[in-house]
């Protein structure tokens, strides 16, 4: 049986605790301010597990924590504990989904689109350059310094960075807290990071949150069980189809062999000679002889 962490053992790299923490607007705002290095004011309450879907025909995705500030900028902040091998293209997909939702039907002025920030927080170095932060925006390859200025920004944060050039000590502390959430010995110099840490401890000791965590885990187990059952059904269906196809091929091969034996008999070849030619088994011989008699 898979080991389940207790609520107190979770870190902010665990989606449940991250969402519970970031649904508090003061925590979400502090995290965004530290990452972006500027002040902002959230317009709406942060939303965890916000569903995005462009059409009922297509798959939906759940964004970890979605927020929007008073200037209209949208922030999707995600934690990713392991490298799935598709994170750059996944961020592209998330960005496209958010953009599609920002455009009101019948409105064709795309200048109304606010900036979109996709932020991925990970305990590994996706690009291997030992940076804490990798920021990507569209710019011209032919003319260095010329940017597309489309408002799309993707940020990949590495909690295990080594090259701190260009980032603040506060961001380093935040990234440390995200991975080592339960390090009670660490004294944070940043007041914002310290407040987030205290908020996490309060959440971890909250009985109602503990109940939600247990329910969320039970839902995950149920989804996995249903997924396994569905997979087993699909596998069994494939096995059944393969067996049916094998049986069909065997029947056709059997019928062809009987037909060959019958043709030999029709051309005046004796049963013994036909057996030597075809190396057919007794069942083929019996069926061929029976069919030859019926046709005669």
Image (spheres, grey):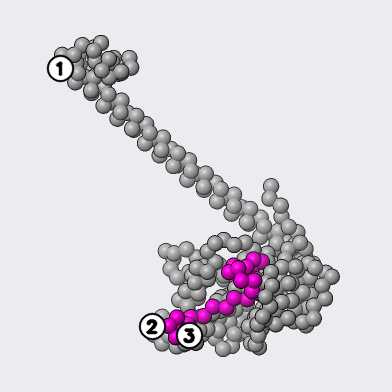
**Pointer 1 local density, CA inside 10 Å: few below 14, some 14–19, many at least 20:** few
**Above or below 152: residue 14:** above
Q: Position of residue 232 (x, y in %)?
A: 52, 44
The disc label shown at residue 106, or none = 2
Closer to the chain start, of discs 1 and 2, is: 2
Which secondary structure, mark 2?
Answer: loop
- State the residue at coordinates (48%, 80%): 138
Q: Is residue 252 left or right of residue 84?
A: left
4, 258: nearer the viewer: 258
Marks 2 and 3, Cα distance to the nearest angstrom? 36 Å
Please tell me whether the stretch drawn in magenta is mainly helix, strand or loop: loop
Residue 163 versus residue 244 in the image, above or below: below
Residue at the extreme right of the image, as rendered: 185
**Which quadrant holds residue 85?**
bottom right
| SS of the residue under disc 3 | loop
Residue receiving disc 3 = 144
Residue 127 among magenta residues: yes
The residue tagged 1 is 267
Q: Is residue 246 left or right of residue 14?
A: left
- 10 Å crowding of disc 2: few (<14), some (14-19), many (20+): few
Q: Is residue 215 visible?
A: yes
Q: Who's the residue at 50% across and 65% down the image?
A: 60
Which mark lies nearer to you, 3 or 1?
A: 3
x then y, percent, for residue 249:
33, 32
Report the front residue among 145 and 214.
Answer: 145
């Amino acid at each position: 049986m898979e080991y389940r962490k207790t609520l107190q053992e979770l870190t902010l790299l665990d989606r449940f605790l991250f969402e519970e923490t970031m649904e508090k607007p003061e925590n979400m705002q502090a995290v965004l301010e530290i990452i972006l290095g500027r002040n902002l004011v959230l317009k709406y309450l942060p939303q965890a597990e916000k569903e995005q879907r462009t059409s009922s025909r297509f798959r939906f995705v759940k964004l970890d924590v979605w927020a929007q500030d008073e200037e209209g900028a949208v922030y999707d902040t995600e934690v990713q504990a392991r490298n799935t091998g598709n994170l750059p293209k996944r961020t592209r997909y998330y960005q496209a989904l958010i953009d599609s939702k920002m455009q009101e039907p019948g409105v064709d002025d795309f200048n109304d689109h606010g900036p979109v920030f996709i932020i991925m927080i990970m305990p590994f170095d996706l690009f291997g350059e030992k940076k804490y932060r990798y920021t990507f925006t569209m710019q011209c390859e032919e003319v260095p310094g010329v940017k597309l200025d489309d408002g799309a920004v993707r940020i990949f944060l590495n909690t295990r960075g080594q090259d701190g050039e260009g980032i603040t000590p506060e961001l380093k502390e935040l990234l440390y807290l995200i991975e080592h959430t339960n390090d009670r010995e660490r004294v944070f110099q940043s007041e914002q990071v310290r407040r987030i840490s205290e908020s996490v401890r309060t959440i971890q000791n909250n009985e109602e949150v503990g109940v939600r965590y247990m329910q969320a885990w039970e839902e995950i187990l149920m989804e996995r069980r249903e997924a396994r059952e569905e997979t087993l059904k699909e596998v069994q269906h494939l096995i059944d189809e393969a067996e049916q196809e094998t049986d069909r091929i065997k029947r056709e091969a059997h019928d062809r062999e009987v037909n060959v034996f019958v043709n030999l008999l029709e051309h005046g070849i004796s049963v013994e000679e036909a057996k030597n030619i075809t190396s057919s088994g007794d069942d083929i011989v019996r069926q061929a002889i029976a069919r030859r008699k019926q046709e005669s």
